[in-house]
Structures are given as C-alpha cells and as structure tokens.
Image (cartoon, rainbow, N blue to C red):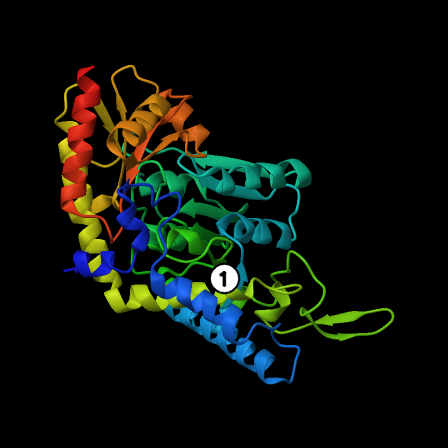
Amino acid sequence: MVDVESIRKDFPILGKGVIYLDSAASSLTPEQVVLKEMEFYREYRANVERGLHRFSQRASEEYETAHEEVAHFIGAKGRENVAMVRNTTEAINLVANSLDWEKGDKIVTTVIEHHSNYITWLRVAQRHGCTVEVVRSNREGIFDLAEFEQSIDDSTRLVAVTHVSNVLGCIQPIKEICSIAHEHGALMLADGAQGVPHIKTDVMEMGVDFLAFSGHKMLGPTGSGGLYIAEEQLESTEPLCIGGGTIRDVSLNSYELAVPPQKFEAGTPAIAQVIGLGEACRYLTGVGMDEVKRWDERLAEKLAEGLSEIDGVEIFGPSDPRQRVGLVSFNVRDMNPHDVALSMDTEYNIAVRSGHHCALPLMKELFGLPDGNARASTYLYNTLEEIDVLLGAVEDIARV
C-alpha cells in the first residue's frame, strides 16, 4: 500500500493549508524532482551533445539517462523510441504533421477526447481531404468494441483514442482497440496524458504505434513530455521541426537527418525539464505503479460513492471504481460549476477544476453541459481524510 504520509513529506506545497484535488490538470512536484532540476543549473549548466568540456559532457549524460528512464517507465524498447517534447499536445501534433496523408484517408477517434486529440484530426481532414469518424460511448464513457469494429475499415489510416478520459476518468481497452486497428492496416495513437501518470504502462504489450504523454501530470516539470514511436514507425515519422541537433550531415543542396530520438528534438531542448521528468519517472517507479493504481481505486471509490449519496449532486463516469482512475466530475443542483469551484477554494481551501475541461464534444453530445462540470482529481499524495473534507464541503454547498 502507498505510504501516503511519507510521500506527503516530499511535497512542501501541501503544507500551505490547501487540499489539492486538481492533479488531472497538473500534478504537484516532489522535492526530489525540484532538486534534480536545480542540480542542472547549479552544477553543470551547459548545452547538450555539442561540447567536449566537462559541463556539456555531464549535461549530455544526464539528458540521455533521462531518456532511458522515461523509455523504461513506459516499457519502450529503447531511448531511441521516445522523443522528448513539451506536452501531449505537441506530441499529437507531431504525428499529425508527420504522416503523408492522402485524400480519402479516414481517422477514427471518439466523443470523449480532449481537444488536443480531436481538433488536431479535424484540421488534418480539412487540409488533406480526409474524413473523421467519431465513435460514441455510453454516458459512463464505456465503449462497445463492436462500434470500433464497425468504424475501422481498410480506408482507416489512424485510430486516435485516449487511454483515460480527463472528464470521466474511464479507462479504455487500448490493447483491444489497437488490435482492431492493426487488422485493417491502420496506425494506433493513444493519448496517455491521464493514463501514464496513474496506470502501469507497457507500450510493447499495448501494441500502440504512438503514445503521447505529459510530464506535468506525472510529478514532472511543466514543459516536459514524450512521444513514444514504435520501431516500425521510426524511419517514416517526420520531425515537426528540423534544425540544429536534428541532422547527421548537411551539404549545399541536401541534408541527412540524425538517428532517433535526436532527429525529433530540434534546437536546444528543455534540458532541465527533461532531466526533471526522468527523476519523476524514477520517483514513481520507486513507489510502484501497481501501488499507485490501487490507491487511485480506493480514493476514487470513496469519492464517487460519497458524492453520489449527497442530495442534489450528479456525478459522471463509470459506476465501477475499477474502471476509472482517481477522478470524479460532478455538478451541484443548478449551480454553475465555476461557482462551485470558487466556493470550494475561498470557503474550504480545496482546489478543484471547473468548466468543459477541453472536451466540449463530450460535454455537449453526452450531457448537454456547455458550461461543463466540477472535477476533483486525486493522486498518490492525497488522503482519505481529504476526501472526507471535500464531501463535507460539497454537502454544505448543496444545501444552499
């Protein structure tokens, strides 16, 4: 079981008197990650892969080690399979802009996607004459695999599905969807922004061609993230930008790109952030992702059951806590969700998120909620007692 009290000591910000339940937007960062970033600036602040002096050599070693830590964390074959980017959005856009699209190509996605894994494909369709087919779930965010089997056909070029919904917290069967995609020769991209921080991830076992994820949701720094690219796609996947650091050779009339992951990381990278992300992976590995998931389920069960028992409160997402991560969105009677979140902050010192959570198609199509809802999201540093405080606050607000 997760030793929450010990873990909380690594997060000095938790001593500010605020109950932080907004980790789906951005997790907190442990002192170990902060110190690792500071180590770079204090001890070997230099550019990577360009210098022979000791600072550059140390920075390069730490940067490459971070690649290896991240690759190991998601079960990738090697560091060459993980390109470091700023966030999930950039990773998805890299894939969207790297493929050689043809008129008539189909992209299959779902109604529960974050905008980053939705409007990106609408733009591809508009630019290249492709089509986007949207698979719909039930109101809990659960899909019938037969719907994917019906939507994915031999004209499908890419299937893009979130591993975990940032609104409903529901976990999707990525491996099974990936198998359907590959039966038709389609590529599979998984949005791992919410999945990688909470669920032990093995890209080889999942079988995905691409996995996009963000460091700032998994204890890492802002401005850090990764794109896993399967071995079979490394050569054909084009970088989003090219320039310094991405080339093997250049002549007056031609250039040759470097080997992965260098070919995807143009210019001076976010060195400190990447090193920090590597340390975040090391931290989570030390805790154990199976333990993180078990604690998630316990917090989610208490949160969902408690909210559902409050008169005037509607919750969204799976009724079975084993089908969700520690994330529950809800509304209170006819209150605007922003008023709920503001009251939680100013009156109860609880930080939650409110709005459409960058998932307007889901809000409009499944629930008819253009203003969205409130969302409480947990992580390994949250306690059962904090959930009790939240439930008491929501009960108070619902009585008004």
Q: Residue furthest right?
A: 252
Residue 116 drawn at (x, y percent): 51, 42
Residue drawn at x 62%, y 77% is 49
- In the picture, the quarter occupied by the C terminus is top left
Q: Nearer the viewer, residue 364 or 132?
A: 364
- When the figure is inspected, residue 45 is found, relative to residue 1, above or below; the finding is below
Left or right of 187? Residue 315 is: left
Residue 36 drawn at (x, y percent): 42, 68
Can residue 160 be seen in the rendering of this structure? yes
- In the picture, the quarter occupied by the N terminus is bottom left
Residue drawn at x 40%, y 66% is 35
- When the figure is inspected, residue 380 is found, relative to residue 321, above or below; the finding is below
**Residue type indicated by callout 1:** Gln
Element type at marker 1? helix
Residue drawn at x 22%, y 48% is 382
- State which quadrant residue 374 falls in: top left
- When the figure is inspected, residue 131 is found, relative to residue 342, above or below; the finding is below
Instruction: Tell me if mark 1 has few (under 14), some (14-19) or many (20+) residues whose alpha carbon lies within 10 angstroms of its own.
Output: many
Residue 218 drawn at (x, y percent): 37, 55
Q: Nearer the viewer, residue 371 or 348?
A: 348
Can residue 205 be seen in the rendering of this structure? no
Residue 352 drawn at (x, y percent): 32, 35
Q: Nearer the viewer, residue 338 or 358?
A: 338
**Which residue does the numbered mark 1 point to in the structure image?**
273
- State which quadrant residue 392 falls in: top left
- When the figure is inspected, residue 126 is found, relative to residue 76, above or below; the finding is above
